[in-house]
Amino acid sequence: MKNERVASKKKIVHILKSSIYSGAENVVLTIMRELRTEFDFIYIATEGTIRKQLEKEKIPFVLLSQFNRKNLEKVLKTISPDIVHAHDFSATVLCATIPSKFQLISHLHYDPPWVNHWNLKTLVYAICHRRIQQVLTVSENAFEAMVFAKLYREKLQVVGNPIDGERIRRLSKDENVDLKGKVCNLIFVGRFVEQKNPQRFIHIVHTIKEQYWPDIRVWMLGDGELWKECTRLIKELGLQKNIELKGFVENPYPYIRCSDIMCITSRWEGFGLVAAEANILGVPVLSTNTSGCREILKNQNDALCENDTQFVTKIQQFHENADIYGLFKQRSLIRGNEFDNVKQYMMQILTIYRELK
C-alpha cells in the first residue's frame, strides 16, 4: 500500500527564472518543504546562489545554464510533470509555448508598472490564457490593476504569501549568528536589482548623514546585478564607514531583529514579504507606496513615503524622538502578530494541486 501511494503522487515542477534566494524563492521552498509528503517536487531555475539553499533543504532540482525555451523544453520532456507551477511572467510565457500535457499554473508574485497597460509583454501573456489553467496572485488589488485582469478573472485565486511567524522568531535568535555589540540603525534587505532600487536607499542614507546623523550605521543584505554599481556609489558618496554590505545572507532574521528601522525603496512590490517579517520581529518599516506594502502596513499608513524627503524626515523623527519611535515599534509588533498563515496557505495550495486534472 505504501509503495502504491508513493507511485501515485503527482509530479510537480516549480520554475523560476532567478538564480538567487529571495522572496519568491522563499515562498516556493516553503511550499515544497510543507507539502513534500503529498507530492514529488522538482525545482528548476538558473545556476546561482539558490543552489546552496536547495542542497541544504535536500530538494530535488535542475539548474539551467541559461533560462530559455530550448533548455526548459528539454528538461520538462525528461521529467514529464503533471503540473508546472511557473512563477511570474517570463517563466509562465516560456512554459505556455511548450507543447505538452502538463497543467500550467501561473503564479504572479509582483506587479511591475508595465502590467497596467497594453504592450508587447502583456499582449503575449494575454495570448497564453488558453494554455494557463490557474492564476495565483498575492493581492487582489494588484491583480485588478493588471490590464489583462478581466481575461483571467475566472481562473484567479488570491493566495497571499505563506508567513511562519514562529519560525521567523526562532531563526532570529540563531546562536550561530553573533551580533553582540553590533549596531544597525537602518537596514535594507533585498535583491540588488532595478525593482528593489538599492541606489535610492544609498542616496537616502547619504542625505541623512549630511543633514543630521553623521555616524549612522547601516546594513545592506542581498546581492544581484547592481552590486558593483552600489559598491561604486557608496565609495563615490563617501559612505564606506556608514554602510556595510553583507552580501547574500542565508538567515537574515537576526540582522533584522537587531536593527532599529527597515527601509524599503522598491519601485513595485506584489506583497512586501520582508515588511511583514520585520513587523513580526517588532522592527518599524518605512516603505515606498507600493500595492504590496500598502497591504502589509495597513495599520501604519504614515510608514508609506512618497519621496526621499519623507524617508529622511521620518527617520529623523525616529532618531530624535524616542516616544514616536516607541509608538511605531508597538504598532509594528501588533501588526506582526497577525501574520501566521502557513497552515491556511498550504491548504489552499494543496486544494489547487489536487483539483487540477
Image (tube, rainbow, N blue to C red):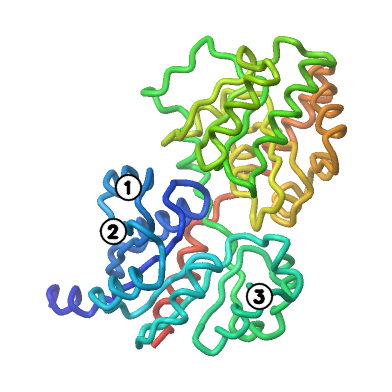
Contact (CB < 8 A) between labels 1 and 2? yes
Q: Nearer the viewer, residue 200 or 296?
A: 200
Q: Which mark is residue 51?
A: 1
Q: Which mark is residue 61?
A: 2
**Residue type highlighted by circle 2:** Phe
Which label number is shown at residue 283?
Answer: none
User: Mark 2 against mark 3, which lies toward the viewer?
Assistant: 3
Q: Relative to 82, is 172 above or below?
A: above
Q: Earlier in the sequence, mark 1 or mark 3?
A: 1
Kind of element beneath mark 2 = strand
Q: Residue at x 80, y 43 (%)?
A: 304
Specify the quadrant of the image occupied by residue 207: top right
Mark 1, other Cα within 10 Å: few <14 / some 14–19 / many ≥20: some
Q: What is the CA distance from the residue labelled 2 to the residue labelled 3?
A: 31 Å
Q: In 3D space, how far apart are the residues under numbered discs 1 and 2 (Cα atoms)?
A: 8 Å
Q: Which disc number belongs to residue 120?
A: 3
User: Could you tell me the amino acid type at mark 3?
Assistant: Leu
Image quadrant where residue 238 sits: top right
Assess disc 2: are there few (<14), some (14-19) or many (≥20) residues with their C-alpha within 10 Å of its C-alpha: some
